[in-house]
Image: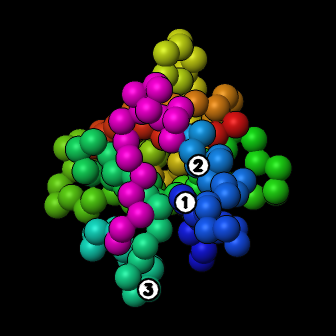
Amino acid sequence: MVLLTGCTATTSGGSAAPTATTATTASASAASAATGCGSRVETGSLPDWADAGFSGDARVPHVFGTKGDIVAVLFSHPLRQVRTDGSTNKILWVARAATTSPDPAAPATLVITATLDGTDTRVTREVAGGPGPSGIDMPQAGCWHLDLRWSGHTDTMDLVYAP
């Protein structure tokens, strides 16, 4: 897997020339800063509780929930409102294992209620069976505030979708 976040190409004169990925990442970062999008995309190692199925020192872009109870592993970074290359906004949701659920009767489905920052635009997405692999698209670019609910647990995070 090649990570392109923040990559630049160097010209023969030694100055950095932005690539399309850098420009997109920069615009996504600018959108994040302008809207107060609070969740930072991490590129370090996944925590031990979230690295099952990965080999070695798993370094993939990921975002932690504010409580630290869930992590969104971003296989498509940056996330995009429109993907023209045939790929999808693949996100692997990994929940921290809990010894007991706050509500054992609660459905396992991961329910994502997303609100576009600064608007009344709200959408709901579901991941059947609970946290796991998904393709989560949003109807507009920008910073989306996500309220996450699964198996009696809750957490929140922000994700930026580039145009």
Q: Quadrant of the N terminus?
A: bottom right
- The residue to which callout 3 is attached is 55
Tag 2 residue? 25
The earlier-in-sequence mark between 2 and 1 is 1
What label does residue 5 carry, if any? 1
- SS state under label 2: helix
Quadrant of res 66 = top left
Task: Give the distance between the C-alpha atoms of the residues marked 1 and 3, in whole angstroms.
Answer: 21 Å
Residue 32: percent from left, percent from top: 47, 35
If you read the primary sequence from the N terminus, does the residue marked by circle 3 or circle 2 appear first?
2
In-front residue for pair 64/128: 64
Q: What element carries label 3?
A: loop
Tell whether 156 sits left or right of 127: left
Q: Measured from the top left, where is residue 10 in percent x and y?
A: 64, 68
**109 w.r.t. 50: above or below:** above
Q: Residues within 10 Å of mark 1 (few under 14, many from 20)?
A: some
Q: Which amino acid does label 2 sit on?
A: Thr
Residue 114 visible to the viewer: no
Q: Name the mark nearer the viewer: 3 or 2.
A: 2
Vertical placement of residue 18 versus 49, above or below: above
- Which of the two residues, 101 or 156, is positioned nearer the viewer here? 156
Specify start and end residues of the magenta stretch as a single range: 29-45
Q: Is residue 86 magenta?
A: no
Residue 133, compared with residue 69, is above or below; it is below
Residue 109: x percent and y percent? 46, 46
The answer to whether mark 2 and mark 1 are in CB contact below 8 A is: yes
Residue at 61% x, 68% y is 14
Is residue 42 placed above or below 3 in the rendered structure? above
Residue 31 lies in the magenta-colored region = yes
**C-alpha distance separating marks 3 and 2:** 26 Å
Distance of label 2 from label 1 (alpha carbons): 7 Å
Instruction: Write the residue at 58% across / 49% down.
Output: 25
